[in-house]
Image (cartoon, rainbow, N blue to C red):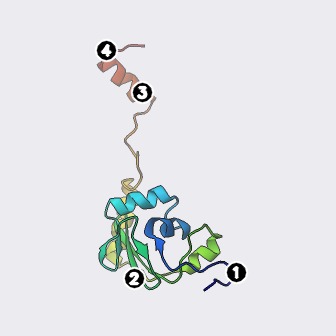
Amino acid sequence: MTGSDGSPAIETVRLDVWLDVTCLFKTRSQAQSACKGGKVEVNGDRGKANRLLQPGDELRISRKGWKQVVIVKALAGQHLPKAEARELYEDVTPEPTAEELELRRLIRDAGLGHPGAGGSPDKRERRRLRRLKGRED
């Protein structure tokens, strides 16, 4: 059996590879980390990075307070242009409720959704910390 471009059709592909190819994660290592951290479910079961996907599988991906639900339509083992990659799945994520939207807005306004927000000391705070530790410049 061959694909539309004459290449052999893929019957199964690893979960982490497919997540990377479809641009749902920027890199394969990010996809592997998400799988290892329990952020990806396949048909209701925990999705391990080496799990083989098939068309029709349902994926639930947890992302910072919301879940994305996608249905696998086709498989690919190599990178494709983004437009073609988006055709490999159907996004069936339900619309967020008014409460969820308000919660997201509050988190965004508080700066809690960004790593390092408010966590890095500025120049003045670094100098003060050095003085406290007894390391004057």
Given residues 75 and 96, the one toward you in this image is 75
Q: Which residue is mark 1?
A: 5
Residue type beneath disc 4: Gly
**Mark toward the viewer: 3 or 2:** 2
| Distance from Cα at disc 1 to Cα at disc 3 | 60 Å
Q: Which residue is mark 2?
A: 94
Residue type beneath disc 2: Pro
Residue at the image point whose x is 42% and y is 52% from the top: 114
Check if mark 1's residue and mark 2's residue have beta carbons within 8 Å: no
Residue type beneath disc 3: Arg
**Mark toward the viewer: 1 or 3:** 1
Which badge, 3 or 4, comes first in the chain's sequence? 3
Q: Secondary structure at mark 3?
A: helix
Q: Position of residue 33 (x, y in %)?
A: 39, 57
Residue at the image point whose x is 44% and y is 69% from the top: 15
User: What's the mark number on residue 134?
Assistant: 4
Which badge, 4 or 2, comes first in the chain's sequence? 2
Q: Which residue is mark 3?
A: 124
| Distance from Cα at disc 3 to Cα at disc 4 | 16 Å
Check if mark 1's residue and mark 3's residue have beta carbons within 8 Å: no
Q: Position of residue 14 (x, y in %)?
A: 46, 69
